[in-house]
Amino acid sequence: MTTTADTPRHTPLPLLVLGHGRDLESERGVECPGDLPAPSDPSLVARARAAKEALGERVFVLGHHYQRDEVIEFADVTGDSFKLAKEAAARPEAEYVVFCGVHFMAESADILTADTQTVVLPDLAAGCSMADMAAVDQVQECWEQLVEAGVADRTVPVTYMNSSAAIKSFTGRHGGTICTSSNAKTALSWALEQAGDGGKVLFLPDQHLGRNTYARDLGRPLEDCVVWDPHKPMGGLTVEQLRDATMILWRGHCSVHGRFTVDAVEAARREIPDVKVIVHPECRHEVVELADEVGSTEKIIKTVAAAPAGTSWAVGTELNLVRRLAAQFPEQRVVFLEKNVCYCSTMNRIDLPHLVWALESLVEGRVVNAIRVDEDTAHWARVALDQMLALPGETAKD
Ligand code: 13P
Ligand code: SF4
């Protein structure tokens, strides 16, 4: 198809009723084949235990920090997305890796595990709205327009882990790197150095992480950032704006972290004496600027764990994690920062019925919801992931 600057290719996002049909561009609207146990079934915990026991070392269950308690209970290891991918790679003896998280995480695990291992996502509707905000044809179109504007050869893509394998693959093909919320500063410094004087970074798909890392962590001017809107011709930018910018931020965001507000930070400070506000860098820039601490999920946990007893924390990240922190550290006062924010709805798609269904199917010799990234996509995505691992100082720390 031929496109011009005036006719951007839009990724069709059909409105499917959840649980019916299939949108191959994302995980929306996927139903589970077979019988899903009822959530009210009182034997679910015993069934999950029995299935795990029957599978023994053949199965390894990973649980992201944002998962429900009922699921975390069965995780062999918990962590942020990068830690979990590494854990999966470090378990070659496990025939099956059951990923209790979202689709992009299961894809990364598939890329990083051996071909003999199978990664299973208990509910295929567990996608990520942020990852869905950058479709590969939109990113290709953006790149073509950077080529036309004469800036592509000085632009290095930096892609957040929270992205599809196809976008990671695009990044590998164009000499870029993946980053996580814990190593974004190092990744961005590396990319800016690669881009050289007058060079640029195309940061995908979370504009907030890109802006926060550039302006807060690297102390560079906000005026250097422009936002590429994939739904507008030329991203809504002029050629001059593109040429003048250093950071081209993709117009994507997390539908959970993007909802924390300045008002909530101010209310916490008013209402809780000596409160410390700690937020995830996916939050908006004005919120991050007002916070006392900013960090990945692993950093948030470690900071609260290491804080002196009696300290108060208002935490701006997913509610399942904040509730668990409050329960695990009763000697601290841990509160959720924003009353208008809910759980991550896609993370919460993974529940005990889906986990039991996935595990029992494996016991019966049926692999359900296997996540397989095609060889070519996996190859280039791996190049971008390996570039991240090669950044100075093994950057995937907290
Ligand atoms: P991390 O787990 O890498 O901190 O990312 C947060 C997140 O939003 C995961 O979906
Ligand atoms: Fe995606 Fe945000 Fe949910 Fe993480 S918390 S899975 S980034 S929507």
Image (spheres, rainbow, N blue to C red):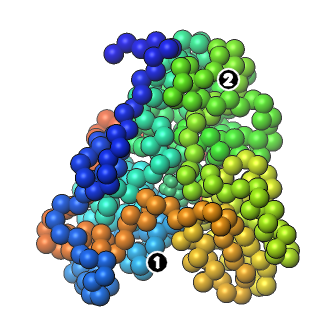
**Spot occupied by residue 53 in the image (x, y as percentages of width and height):** 26, 83
Q: Amino acid at mark 1?
A: Asp
Q: Is residue 177 above or below residue 256?
A: above
Tally of numbered tags: 2
Closest to the observer, 256 or 92: 256
Q: Residues within 10 Å of mark 2 (few under 14, many from 20)?
A: many
Q: Secondary structure at mark 2?
A: loop
**Spot occupied by residue 8 in the image (x, y as percentages of width and height):** 46, 21
Closest to the observer, 259 or 182: 259
Q: Amino acid at mark 2?
A: Gly
Q: Residue at x 69, y 19 (%)?
A: 241
Q: Is residue 380 above or below residue 141?
A: below
Image quadrant occupied by the N terminus: top left
Q: Which residue is mark 1?
A: 69
Tell me: 181 left or right of 368.
right
Say which label, 1 or 2, has the lower sequence index.
Answer: 1
Closest to the observer, 16 or 184: 16
Distance between the alpha carbons at the discs numbered 1 and 2: 45 Å
For the residues bearing labels 1 and 2, Cβ distance under 8 angstroms: no
Q: Which residue is mark 2?
A: 199
Tell me: 370 left or right of 104.
left
Q: Secondary structure at mark 1?
A: helix
Q: Residues within 10 Å of mark 1 (few under 14, many from 20)?
A: some
Closest to the observer, 49 or 94: 49
- Observer-side mark, 1 or 2, equals 1
Image quadrant occupied by the C terminus: bottom right
Q: Residue at x 53, y 20 (%)?
A: 233
